[in-house]
Image (cartoon, rainbow, N blue to C red):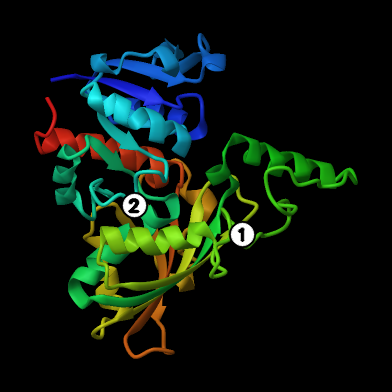
Amino acid sequence: MAFKIAVIGATGNVGREILNILDERTFPCEEVFALASRKSTGREISFGDTILKVKDLETFDFSQVDIALFSAGSKISEKWGPIAAAAGAIVIDNSSFWRYHDDVPLIVPEVNPDDVIHSKKRGIIANPNCSTAQLVVALKPLHDIAKIERVVVSTYQSVSGAGNAAMEELFNQTKGIFVNQAAEPENFTKQIAFNVIPHIDVFLDDGYTKEEWKMLAETKKIIDKSIKLTATCVRVPVFVGHSEAVNIEFEKSISPEKARSILRKSPGVMVVDDPEEDKYITPTECVGEYATFVSRIRVDSTVKNGLSMWIVSDNLRKGAALNAVQIAELLINKKLIG
């Protein structure tokens, strides 16, 4: 059976990546609609060997699609998600708006696939934050064996997570510095070229940023509400690919060897871990890949049952577009659609 798919925000980084992944994974599409704002109407965008003409979201009839993949920001998802769901489409949303609603499942297919059944309540499924998605793919298999009590994570997040304009800013600042041009921030609070910025999203009253809060709230919702987590989220001058330095405290002892063995058998995870041979993954090596890569698994001797590791993933793929398409595949496999 083939399905009719709408991609909302089709002209953005994640929207284009969704179209690429639908084609790469030969998703059973009967028809694909590329939707965006009125100013993009008529613009041509590639989908495999075909060209789609962008349609106006404001006038689109969602009753003609089975699945609506949203990647156009929270305001669009807040308004149009319920409209699409009421018209009969199942909504898979990449924004943060629906993630924290109790009646909307927050899904990473390798981690909590059975929760997708709860999508029947609203007809909406939420995709987690990009930094959370890669983290929980690595944490869940270990949690099942040794139970995680506490996680400390520092992220190194690429500028693509902030959109096309942010990528252009990094490029222009980098180029400009070599000809003595001032690096004026526009999309970031500070210069991003040759710099790191410990500030993603807005600051909250407790001193954490909303990005850091998201990682805590989403990890609890996806894996286990008893997990304690603290995060420091940092924007770095990398175009694509998020990295995370993670320290984990377990309820019982688990060796690095055991952790490697578990993760090698886990869906969506690729272990590349041999420091003596310089075998570890960096952001540039993960671009275009589906896997979440785990390297540098070692004992954290500062706590009783601790491990430290390095986690890297393509944030436009597993952090957003790939996870959304995998959720759509999950709906088909569980016969929740069609």
Q: Quick one: 101 or 67, which is closer to the camera?
A: 101
Neighbour class for label 2 at 10 Å: few (<14), some, many (≥20)? some
Question: Residue, x 39% and y 89% (percent of image)?
Answer: 303
Q: Is residue 107 left or right of residue 14?
A: left
**As rendered, which of 222 and 315 lies closer to the eye?**
222
Above or below: residue 26 compared with residue 265: above
Where residue 160 appears, x then y in whole percent?
56, 43
Query: In which quadrant of the rendered image does the N terminus lie?
Result: top left
Indicate the quadrant where residue 15 lies.
top left
Q: Nearer the viewer, mark 1 or mark 2?
A: 2
Residue at image position (25%, 66%) is 224
Q: Secondary structure at mark 1?
A: loop
- Asked if residue 266 lies left or right of residue 298, the reply is left
| x then y, percent, for residue 30 | 23, 15
* The quarter of the displayed image where residue 163 is located: top right
Identify the amino acid type marked 1: His
Q: Residue at x 26, y 52 (%)?
A: 102
Which residue was labeled with disc 1?
199
Q: Tell me if residue 272 can be seen.
A: no
Instruction: Specify the label residue 62 is tagged with.
Output: none
Which structural element holds mark 2?
A: loop
- Observer-nearest residue: 218 or 333? 218
- Report which residue position mark 2 lands on: 100
Amino acid at the residue labelled 2: Tyr
Q: Would you identify the image quadrant in which residue 164 lies?
A: top right
